[in-house]
Image: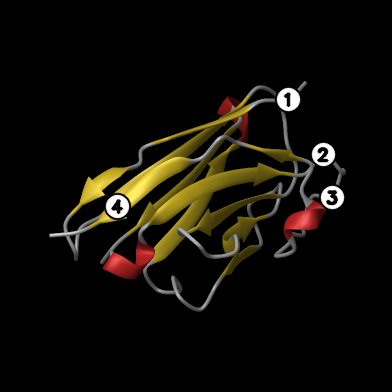
Amino acid sequence: QVQLVESGGGLVLPGGSLKLSCAASGPMYAMGWFRQAPGKDRKFVAGISRNGGHTDYSDFVKDRAAITRNNAQDTLYLQMDNLKPGDTAIYYCAADSDEYYTITFRDPNEYDYWGQGTQVTVSS
């Protein structure tokens, strides 16, 4: 059973930065970050293809986030800058096991594995 373990969440001041990490127990293909705020649906944040050549961002983090991956270490990252209180949510890592190298997905149903989530709180 593949496991995804997120880390790097915490409390940050508005305007601050965080870098989230997601360690996978084995090689994954398309990967992504989603977030869920209290009482809200889970939303796509960013995605990246297996080869790293294709990335996709939601409008609400575009220009403030960077998704990257290190396939040698089976690790996914999300750097987020200029954080806002509206970014407060549990952030989840997701991974797809289908062997696509150049695409990523916004639809959570495309992902086979999910981490347990890491809390990000943006507050003064």
Q: Residue at x 70, y 53 (%)?
A: 49
Q: Please tell me which of labels 3 and 4 falls first in the chain.
A: 3
Q: Please tell me which of labels 1 and 2 falls first in the chain.
A: 1
Q: Which mark is residue 100?
A: 3
Q: Quadrant of the C terminus?
A: bottom left
| Label 3: which secondary element | loop
Which residue is nearer to you in this view: 1 or 29? 1
Crowd tier of the residue under label 4, counting other residues whose Cα lies within 10 Å: few below 14, some 14–19, many 20 or above: many
Q: Position of residue 116 (x, y in %)?
A: 56, 35
Q: Please tell me which of labels 2 and 4 falls first in the chain.
A: 2
Pointer 1: what residue?
2
Mark 3 vs mark 2, CA separation in Å = 8 Å
Residue furthest bottom in the image: 59
Q: Nearer the viewer, mark 1 or mark 4?
A: 4
Identify residue type, mark 2: Ser
Mark 1 vs mark 4, CA separation in Å = 28 Å
Q: Nearer the viewer, mark 3 or mark 2?
A: 2
Mark 1 vs mark 2, CA separation in Å = 10 Å
Identify residue type, mark 4: Thr
Q: Please tell me which of labels 1 and 4 falls first in the chain.
A: 1
Pointer 2: what residue?
97
User: In the rendered structure, are the residues bearing label 1 and label 2 in contact, judged by CB atoms less than 8 Å apart?
Assistant: yes
User: In the rendered structure, are the residues bearing label 3 and label 4 in contact, judged by CB atoms less than 8 Å apart?
Assistant: no
Q: Which mark is residue 121?
A: 4
Identify residue type, mark 3: Tyr
Q: Position of residue 78 (x, y in %)?
A: 45, 50
Q: Nearer the viewer, mark 2 or mark 4?
A: 4
